[in-house]
Amino acid sequence: MKSSDSSVASFYSIRLSVFFVGLLLWLINMPSQAALDIEIFGGGANKMPIAVAPFTGERSLPQDISTIVAADLKRSGLFKLIDPLGLTSHEPVSYVDWLGRGANTVVVGNTETLPDGRVEIQFRLLDVVKQTQLTGFGGTVTPEQLRAFAHRIADIVYETLTNEPGVFSTRIAFVKKQAGKYALQVADYDGANAHSLIEYTEPIISPAWSPNGSKIAYTSFENKKPVIYVQALATSERKAVANFKGSNSAPVWSPDGSKLAVVLTLHGGSQLYLINEDGSGLQRISNSQGIDTEPSFSPDGKWLLFTSDRGGSPQIYRMPVTGGAAERLTFEGDYNVSPHYSPDGKWFVYIHRNAGRLNVAVQDLATRHMQVLTDSSFDESPSFSPNNRMILYTTEISGRGILSIVSSDGQVKSRFSQEAGDIREAVWGPLLKQ
């Protein structure tokens, strides 16, 4: 790490020395909260051409169902959205016209507002070439549930056409700084419907979802030192599980949810430890002369990725979860940090520095091929979606963090342009059973 590069030094110290993280991350006072929007950059070829027709009756609803479904599908990077150009969901479906527009499949639907204010929604996914219905779904929801129902439709369409699970109904967590307060928030995967789990005037960092999505571990400075807490989402009940001498930070859950990998300075410099979910059974894993931090469990629970400067610069290493020799995995560039395994265990995502820019990159663990996915200036905190297809991260625009998503091939990028608030430490939650 070059001392002359102040921005990179700040970023690295956030990850490697949590004592000063809050002061380095958020220096700007932000205006009031406002709604999230999305912008989509780029497209890419060889996508599945699909159209989402405006649902009948949706213009009278608080939100357009078809707009949310279309945005979900496009963000995945697997679909090419065909503009309806005046075609609608009205029956009979004009297969010839849809085929002329270039759509292989089309989503049509209708909505009806009931006397009690609830909304009845029906949708169908149609094969335009074969002129058949592939699937359909319906239900009745309150106006507040419209967005969740639209995400569910997108999940069904995605799963039908790809044979992979859709992730549009999943949640994310992140830390938001606004008006001098730090809030740990949970939101829909696209940043909508955010609500705070805790708020303090001291920094909160490193949120980590439990494998079943019922709890979040995080590091809080509320007692003027970094302490690791585990908090249940349903009850808000929480417990300090690592409050040892020195720094306690960077918790991540084992795949079975029984343990956490954490970073402690209990015996000097930052090193990796395992601890039971209830705070018992502390076990040291790494024993290096450098700073070891940012652990990430492999999906089979046998390996830990982590960041270390033991070789003279921050790089990504892998070691058995039982401890032992560490293998260096990154060699391109002198700065690679913040690794996270993909859910299938075949890749890991991380932050790579090139020409002074900090960008999201992925590496194939089998071939060691790396690919930089973003072209922004200051990205951080990348994590995979539960189906491996998208990566959530934050990117700094005009001095504040913005939620962003990039497809795992780098061809589709989405940015959630929030009018207020500084967003950091984003992490994607697990796939929940329906």
Image (cartoon, rainbow, N blue to C red):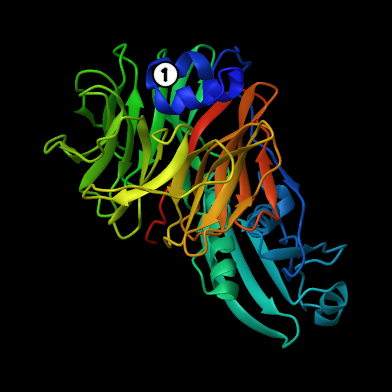
Q: Nearer the viewer, residue 269 or 359?
A: 269
Please report the residue visible at 60 percent of the width from the left and 12 percent of the height from the top: 29
Q: In the rendered image, which quarter is residue 271 located in?
A: top left
Residue 402 figure quarter = top right
Q: Nearer the viewer, residue 318 or 90?
A: 318
Residue that mark 1 sits on: 203
Residue 344 percent coordinates (x, y)? 43, 63
Residue drawn 64% across and 82% down? 133
Examine the rendered structure and indicate whether residue 303 appears above or below residue 183. Answer: below
Image vertical order of residue 263 relative to residue 108, above or below: above
Q: Residue at x 74, y 51 (%)?
A: 59
The picture places residue 377, in percent across and down from the top left corner, at 68, 32
- The extreme left residue here reads 281
Q: Secondary structure at mark 1?
A: loop
Q: Residues within 10 Å of mark 1 (few under 14, many from 20)?
A: many
Quarter of the rendering containing residue 396: top right
Taking the image as drawn, is residue 233 in sight? no
Q: Position of residue 159 (x, y in %)?
A: 54, 70
Q: Nearer the viewer, residue 321 or 342?
A: 321
Q: Is residue 374 visible?
A: yes
- Taking 7 as reference, is 393 above or below it? below
Quadrant where the image shows the C terminus: bottom left
Q: Position of residue 19 (x, y in %)?
A: 38, 16
- In this picture, residue 401 sits left or right of residue 412: left
Q: Is residue 401 left or right of residue 215?
A: right
Amino acid at the residue labelled 1: Pro
